[in-house]
Image (tube, rainbow, N blue to C red):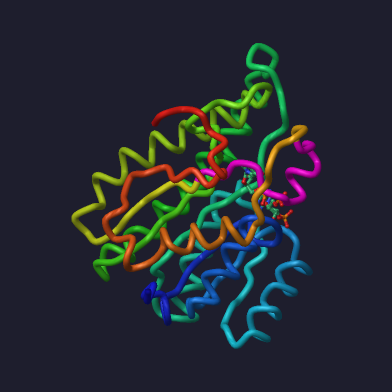
Amino acid sequence: MDLGLSGRVAVVTAASKGLGRASALALAAEGARVLVSARTASLLDELVAEIAAAGGEAHAVVGDMTDPALPARLVEVALERWGRLDVVVANAGGPPTGRALDVDDDALLAAFQVNALASIRLARAAVPHMTERGWGRVVFIASASVKQPIRDLALSNTARTALWAWTKTAAADVAASGITINVAAPGLHATDRLLERGVPAGARTGTPEDFGKVVTFLCSEPAAFVNGTAVAVDGGATLGLL
Ligand SMILES: NC(=O)c1ccc[n+]([C@@H]2O[C@H](COP(=O)([O-])OP(=O)(O)OC[C@H]3O[C@@H](n4cnc5c(N)ncnc54)[C@H](OP(=O)(O)O)[C@@H]3O)[C@@H](O)[C@H]2O)c1
C-alpha cells in the first residue's frame, strides 16, 4: 500500500527519544521530510544524521514544548525550508505520578500545559496552512489512559483526556478541509519513560517501532477517513469498550 507520504513535510515534537523519535523515523522511511524538535540538541543531531544516512531528509529545531512561541517557529521553519507543512505529530514528555487527591493546582496546571495546551497550540498554528492546501494530518501522542485511567497517574489521566476531548471537537471542524486530527494512545512501550516508571510484572511491552508505524499510518493518505479517533496501540491491554 502506498501511504502517500513521499515528499510531504512533517513536524514531530519531543522527537529526541522514544515514541516521538520512532514516529519521525517511520515517517522519514516513507519519504516524508521531517522537522524534529525537542530540548536536547545532540540527540536531535544524531536523529537527523540517521535519517540522512538512510537517504531521507530531516532538520532539527531545539525547543521546549511549553514555550508558547515554539509552534509558530516550527511552522515558519517548515515553510521556509520546504514551502509546505502537511503533517504534525505532537508529543511531549509525561508528567510525574501522583494520586488524584494529592496533586495540587500547580502540578495540574503544569500537566495541562505540557500534555494538552502545547499540542493544541501546535495544531492551531499548523492547521491554517493545511486548510490552504486542502490536506493535513494531525496526530497527538497521548496515552491509553484516555480510554482507561491509570492508577496513580492523575496528572496524565486528567491532561490527556482534555486533549482527547479537544481532538474530538476539532476533528469535526476540519473534516471538510481534508484534514484529520487523531490521538495515538500508547500502552506500555519499552522507552526511557517506561524504564523510569517501571514495567508492571508480567506486562507485555511494545517497541517504539511498533508505535511509530501506527502513527505513520494515521498520517497517511489511506487513513483519510479516520478522524476524531483515539487509536489504542497497546497489544490489547486496555479493557474498556470505547
Ligand atoms: N512509553 C510508554 O509506555 C508510554 C505509555 C503511555 C504514554 N506514554 C507517553 O508518550 C509520550 C512519549 O513517551 P516516551 O516513552 O517516548 O518518553 P521518553 O522516551 O521519555 O521520551 C520523551 C521525549 O519527550 C521529550 N520532551 C520531554 N519534555 C519535553 C518538553 N517540555 N519539550 C519538548 N520535548 C520534551 C524528550 O526530549 P528532550 O528531553 O530532549 O526534550 C524526549 O524526546 C510521553 O508523554 C509519555 O508519557 C508513553
Hey, which residue is sitting farthest top in the picture? 101
The quarter holding residue 36 reads: bottom right
Residue 35 to residue 183: above or below: below
Quadrant location of the C terminus? top left
Residue 78 to residue 21: above or below: below
Say which residue appears at 38% left-offset and 37% top-offset: 166
Hey, which residue is sitting farthest front in the picture? 202
User: Viewer-proximal residue, 138 or 193?
Assistant: 193
The residue stretch that appears in magenta: 185-199
Residue 163 on the magenta segment: no
| Spot occupied by residue 138 in the image (x, y as percentages of width and height) | 41, 56
The quarter holding residue 15 reads: bottom right
Residue 143 to residue 55: above or below: above
| Spot occupied by residue 56 in the image (x, y as percentages of width and height) | 57, 83
| Spot occupied by residue 125 in the image (x, y as percentages of width and height) | 41, 56
Say which residue appears at 24% left-offset and 61% top-offset: 178
